[in-house]
């Protein structure tokens, strides 16, 4: 069984640029959630995708968008990057929407915005 | 109401001692309470989790105690080891799968 994988591992961008982060969910999982973790903080929920549809969104502006593909892998896109977008971006997969489904996290993508 | 408050922010324990981390929540719709362990540069790893119909759950050296009426839960690490040194996050989840995390506790276990 393959765990959650994310790419790239690290990324450096400049303010105003756009970035795409990728996530492959764990085998058998159809739900992907994205989280932003600033240094020294707990992860903050960005949004969740269930069977290719967005299912819930946290307090993030529309320049944060996403996609889920038929194989349940997912992308997070961030437009017009700001310095405060520098963070570890985490993807988590689970097997459904019901409360109590275990979410398994990938290693994250470290984004630095200069 | 969506917050999960975690304490302490940092904790130093001697090898073999007991590490205790506490969390409190407000939203009674939460029905799943996991704890995650995170090492520097890594993603959070699920450690142990509990549902509110159970007051205690033990897995090896890790125990969750849950007090539904007080809306509090805690993680106990027995016989703490230097390899347990990491950041620990409590979280709460309601139907739909959105996890609300605490601020984290940086645990250091001294040999």
Image (tube, coloured by chain):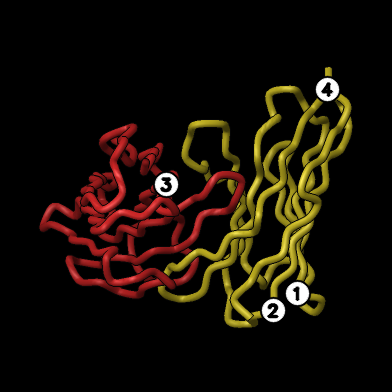
Is label 1 on the same chain as label 2? yes
Mark nearest the camera among 1 and 4 is 4
Is label 4 on the same chain as label 3? no
Q: Disc 1, disc 2: CB below 8 Å?
A: yes
Q: Which residue is mark 2?
A: B26
Q: Which residue is mark 3?
A: A86
Figure quadrant of the C terminus of chain B? top right
Chain painted in yellow in the figure: B
The image's mark for residue B110 is 4
Mark nearest the camera among 4 and 3 is 3
Q: CA distance from mark 1 to mark 3?
A: 33 Å
Name which of mark 2 and mark 4 comes first in the sequence: 2
Q: CA distance from mark 2 to mark 4?
A: 34 Å
Figure quadrant of the N terminus of chain B? bottom right
Say what secondary structure mark 1 lies in. Answer: loop
Image check: A86 left or right of B6?
left
Residue B60 location in percent, x, y? 70, 37
Depth check, front residue: B110 or A30 = B110
The image's mark for residue B98 is none
Image check: A53 left or right of A10?
left
Q: Pointer 1 indicates a residue of which chain?
A: B
Q: Quadrant of residue A12?
A: top left
Few, some or many residues within 10 Å of mark 2 (<14, 14–19, 20+):
some
Chain A image colour: red
Q: CA distance from mark 4 to mark 3?
A: 32 Å
Q: Which residue is mark 1?
A: B71
Residue at (13%, 52%) from the top-left corner?
Answer: A71
């Amino acid at each position: 069984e393959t765990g959650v994988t994310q790419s790239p591992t690290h990324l450096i961008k400049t303010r105003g640029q756009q970035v795409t982060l990728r996530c492959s969910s764990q085998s058998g999982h159809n739900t992907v959630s994205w989280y932003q973790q600033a240094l020294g903080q707990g992860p903050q929920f960005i949004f969740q995708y269930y069977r290719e549809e967005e299912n819930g969104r946290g307090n993030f502006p529309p320049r944060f968008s996403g996609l889920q593909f038929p194989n349940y892998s997912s992308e997070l896109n961030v437009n017009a990057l700001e310095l405060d977008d520098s963070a570890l971006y985490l993807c988590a997969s689970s097997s459904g929407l019901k409360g109590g489904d275990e979410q398994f996290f990938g290693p994250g993508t470290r984004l630095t915005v200069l | 109401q969506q917050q999960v408050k975690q304490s302490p922010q940092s904790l130093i324990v001697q090898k073999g001692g007991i590490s205790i981390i506490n969390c409190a929540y407000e939203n009674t719709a939460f029905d799943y309470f996991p704890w995650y362990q995170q090492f520097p540069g890594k993603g959070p790893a699920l450690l142990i989790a509990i549902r509110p119909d159970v007051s205690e759950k033990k897995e090896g050296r890790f125990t969750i105690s849950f007090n539904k009426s007080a809306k509090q839960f805690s993680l106990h690490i027995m016989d703490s080891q230097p390899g347990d040194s990491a950041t620990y996050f409590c979280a709460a989840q309601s139907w739909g799968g959105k996890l609300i995390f605490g601020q984290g506790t940086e645990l250091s276990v001294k040999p």
